[in-house]
Amino acid sequence: MHMADALVSSAVGGAMWAASAGLAGYSAWKLKGEAAESRAPLMGVLGAFVFAAQMVNFSIPMTGSSGHLGGGLILAVLLGPHAAFIVMFSILAVQALFFADGGLLALGCNAFNLGFWPCFVAYPLVFRGIAGREPGRGRLAAGSMAAGIVSLQLGAFGVVAQTAASGISDLPFGMFLLLMQPIHLAIGVVEGAVTAALFSFVAKARPEILAHGAEPGAGALRLVLAAFAVAAVVTGGVLSWFASSLPDGLEWSMFKASGKEEPDVPAKGIRSSLAGIQEKTAVLPDYGFRPGAEGPGSMDAGTEAGGPPGGDSAAWPAISAGTTLSGLVGGLAVLVLAGLAGFCIRFIKRRP
Amino acid sequence: MSRIDVLARDMESLDLLASRDTPVRRLDPRAKAAVTAMFLGTVVSFGKYEIAEMTPLFLYPAAILALGQVPARVLFRYLLFASPFALLAGMFNPVLDRETAISLGALDVPGGWISFASIMLRFMLTVSAVLLLLACTGYVQVCAALGRLGAPRIVITQFLLLHRYMFILSDEAARMTRAHMLRSRDGRGPGIRVWASLAGHLLLHAHDRGSRTHSAMLARGFDGSLPSLRAFRWSWADTCFLAGCGGFFVLARFGNLAERLGDLMGFAV
């Protein structure tokens, strides 16, 4: 359930990067000067453990499929939420860098979905709430299961919300949500079960390791509230970008009033706000509404002003068969040129 | 060879590639990190239907591939490795968005296919840029550059130590998986109980190793930061690289290069 670069718009990617980098910076600040900072080797090794443990797939009973560990909750229990978030961030970054899992721009989204929810919400509020300070095996298992389900549900919701807000994929919000939440309920149960099994093993073998995790104080709750405030600002930022489609709609209806349109079009406009943006991008070409199709500058100005969906709607009308054909041919030519340039440079470099 | 072995070998081969002396390697890692970030930003700033407009950006990975002397098969292998992910991400677009977006003579192309192509192009560009940064700079140098650009010390130390121990613990995990596979009847992965025992032992080993390493590092004066051996030196070449790439990205983003080239070639209507 990693977000991919190809699915993230610049606005969503940038906002989530800001949120995740802010959280990493806050965590680093919280750990600064503490003994925790010199516990870096333990953080590094436990990060590598989660990385390695993710490579050992287990078979899921009765399904014939296999799964792997997420790891956020285990790290939060062993290291405390702040150090755990930094470790999750580093694991996701390495996965993005070496395996193209997600990608660098989507790293902000992924760190938020897979790091923030388990470390700062599921661990302090759910796991600690159920397991308490000195949990027995039953409470440990119940806490891990509940925290696993909560963090996976929130993470899956994050993926759906970010995908929908980016608008690159055409998946409708409702359908995608109905697809993702039940699947991640099952994945959450499995994650909870393996985490509980691992804790149960460690509690039997070396109980003192589990007691090392930093206790979340009142600060953790404050952080959660602050993070929700950040999330609200982010959501507001993203939503305002949907709202920015409103003036476009006005402009559109004014344009319609000038009497150039087909009558059936307005009926198509009644959809959800998300679908409406795509609808608009598809409808406008019918109007031959070409704000500066001849001048690429004005097209780009529209792209800049409106953000991605506005950009689409501004850029879209400029497309006609002619410009598209020349664009496609030009694009192919550029690709060939890029390849040739590469070969030439390599050829010249090989010569003594 | 198991999946883990293949992954570990790939990562080592990338580090080996980055250790060779090439013109791109000689550039300051900070410049390369900044240019990669600008490139990614430019790629994702294109609208979902702008595919021809995006193509000039392929010049950047092509040039870095050649100047950095990265074997093209390494890049293709990575693209292939990560492609199911992008295909999964984009496969719904052609199904969901069927409205005709462009007509090329008798051929009507639905918007879904265009946005699908856009997703694949974005995927190729972003994955290539990140892989080339790693293959021409090296993970350790990228981390050091991020540290010099202001990332918190503990985050950078974590990145470096994770990289250091990832291979060691992955090897250990691979040995455990192999041992289990050789002793199991059906060759499937372990069940949850056995997995917990395997992962639990791995965790205990990791924890002990971390504690030992910690004591050893403290005894040698570890103060929370890992010193970098290579001094960073910003030269004119770095400024030119940064300005040149930045200029090209702006031109590619706003200059509509593909269409102009198409016009030049006589395809204007």
Image: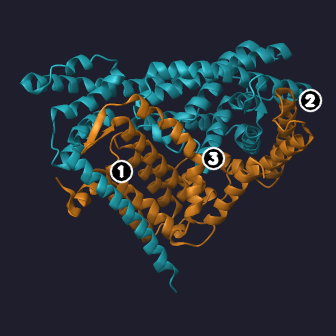
Chain colours: A cyan, B orange
Question: Where residue B46 appears, x then y in whole percent?
Answer: 35, 44
Q: Is residue B32 visible?
A: yes
Q: Which circle, 1 or 2, is nearer the viewer?
A: 1
Tell me the tag on residue A94. Answer: 3
Sequence-first tag of 2 and 3? 3
Looking at the image, which residue is at 21% across and 42% down?
A318
Read off the residue under disc 1.
B54
Q: Amino acid at mark 2?
A: Ala
Looking at the image, which residue is at 32% across and 33% down?
A309
**Foreground: B121 or A223?**
B121
Question: Where residue B62 appears, x then y in whole percent?
Answer: 45, 63
Read off the residue under disc 2.
A205
Question: Where residue B118 appears, x then y in whole percent?
Answer: 40, 43
Which element type, helix, strand or loop, lies under badge 2? helix
Separation of marks 1 and 3 at Cα, in angstroms = 27 Å
| Count of numbered circles in the view | 3
Task: Tell whether A288 sits left or right of B254.
Answer: left
